Amino acid sequence: MTTRPVRGLEIAEVDEDAVASYLSATPEFFDRHAQLLAKIRLPDSRGSATTVSLLERQVEVLRERNRQLERKLKEFVDVARENDTLGARVFAMARRLIAAADRAAVIKTIEASLREDFGAGESVLVLTPAAAPANLADSRFLRVVATDSPDLRSFETLFSSGKPRCGQLRDSQRDFLFGTGSVAIGSVALVPLGPKGSLGLLACGSNDVQRFNPTMSTDFLQHIGELIAAALAAD
């Protein structure tokens, strides 16, 4: 065992891990040696050349933990508020759909609700012939496509999963949904309608590439898809 001088004294060098283990296993050590808490000096965590006492460092650690907890709490509150807002919008859509007299009215209600309640102006509803109302022509919002259409088959992965998906599209998919050359659409939320997309799909686009990103929750999109499918099947 080697020794090193400390203010005129020679003490044995001790393995740091052993010291750490001892202090962890003996939390009452500083109860018996309380005077050490004020004497031990540590480098300032803010990067200055000064030193602070162990007590000051502990206070700063607790303050930082408190700040982290406050940030986490704010995130939880923000998410809860956003969920409340989305829940109210889904409820408003449900009320609108209940009041729709027929399938043509359902289509108009879906478009109006997406635009007015959700602010989703870049939306497209793609329906199979069985789900589409008779004698209702295609429009900017509505697209009626045969079930064996290559354009519709390009979404087979979405239909197979039966779950909404958010992110970016292939150019051919984007052009089919939003028109040729629609490069302004940066991200899209896709919602299959009916079992395995048997009724079609809903697409909501945004110019913001992060608006509909793959990491976002799709629970409310799932609810919207179920509401639309139920309204279309009810007629």
Image (cartoon, rainbow, N blue to C red):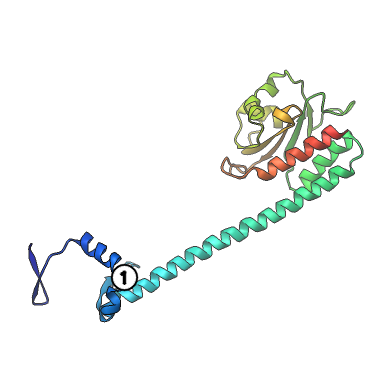
Determine whether, in the image, residue 47 is placed left or right of residue 174: left
Q: Is residue 162 visible?
A: yes
Q: Position of residue 185 (x, y in %)?
A: 65, 37
Q: Quadrant of residue 13?
A: bottom left
* Residue drawn where x is 74% and y is 21% of the image: 147
Q: Is residue 158 above or below residue 214?
A: above
* Residue drawn where x is 83% and y is 28% of the image: 132
Quadrant of the rendering where the C terminus is positioned: top right
The amino acid type, in three-letter code, at marker 1 is Pro
Q: Is residue 49 visible?
A: no
Q: Which residue is denoted by mark 1 in the rendering? A: 27
| Nearest the eye: 32 or 219 | 32
Mark 1 element type: loop
Q: Position of residue 29 (x, y in %)?
A: 27, 74
Q: Quadrant of residue 148?
A: top right
* Residue drawn where x is 70% and y is 30% of the image: 177
Q: Is residue 205 above or below residue 18?
A: above
Q: Position of residue 75 (x, y in %)?
A: 57, 58
| Nearest the eye: 209 or 184 | 209
Name, please, the residue furthest toward the right: 101
